[in-house]
Amino acid sequence: MNIVKILSKERSSSSGYPRLKPSIITGKEQFFEENEVIVSKTDSRGIITYVNDVFLRVSGYKEKELIGRPHNLIRHPHMPKCVFKLLWDTLKNGDEIFAYVVNLTKSGDHYWVFAHVTPTFSTDGTITGMHSNRRVPSRSALVQIEALYAQLLGEEKKYNNSKSAILASYSILVESLQSKGVSYDEFILSL
């Protein structure tokens, strides 16, 4: 079946460049090889400064479409926003984080990754950016992650205000971890 792709152009407040996002979510999953690593780097505000060839191939974007754009260009609408709150809070504290993430391709397909994101520091210790390596995720881990993310998204959809939605779903995430008696890192690395 051919799906007509219509791209919406939005202004990026941070770069001033038009940002292309697919207007159709196809539901089709893209895959990459076990031995491949998707790599990207951003500045401290999340603006892309580097992408590798695997990133370009899997996402369907050209390098010139990504460099200087916000990394959330590839954010899939099925990703709970509270996970990105946790990610950014962790990185801003100077710590690394592991996370399962579903991303959106230029064509509206999606792909799952197991991401390891670390802050990049200047010689004086200031955070200057982020570096992310993404590998093929465990399919059995995704069963648990998809159930958790569905619960978090369900909570976020109850709110009209984005900030309230994120705080409510974040609270559920924290409660879920506490009920298991584990930290976020322990939970993710146990899957």
Image (tube, helix red, strand yellow):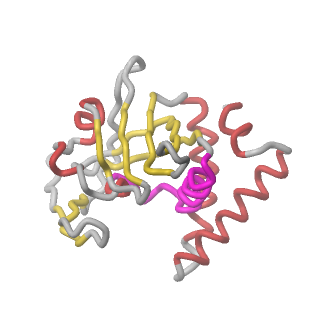
What residue sits 24% from the left and 58% below the top? 22
In this view, the residue in front, 23 or 57, is 57
The answer to whether residue 108 is above or below residue 154 is above
Residue at the extreme bottom: 160
Horizontal side of residue 103 vs 138, given as left or right: left
The answer to whether residue 170 is above or below residue 13 is above
In this view, the residue in front, 143 or 88, is 88
- The quarter of the picture where the C terminus appears is top right
Q: Is residue 54 visible?
A: yes
In this view, the residue in front, 82 or 160, is 82
What residue sits 38% from the left and 40% below the top? 111
**How far across and down, in percent of the image, does residue 172 sit?**
72, 62
Q: Quadrant of residue 16?
A: bottom left
| Residue 92 forms part of the magenta stretch | yes
Counting labels gives 0
Q: Is residue 8 visible?
A: no
Q: Quadrant of residue 11?
A: bottom left
Residues shaded magenta: 74-94
What residue sits 59% from the left and 73% below the top? 165
**How far across and down, in percent of the image, does residue 180 sit?**
83, 45
- The quarter of the picture where the N terminus appears is top left
The answer to whether residue 166 is above or below residue 50 is below
Horizontal side of residue 43 vs 50, given as left or right: right
**How far across and down, in percent of the image, does residue 81 sit?**
53, 62
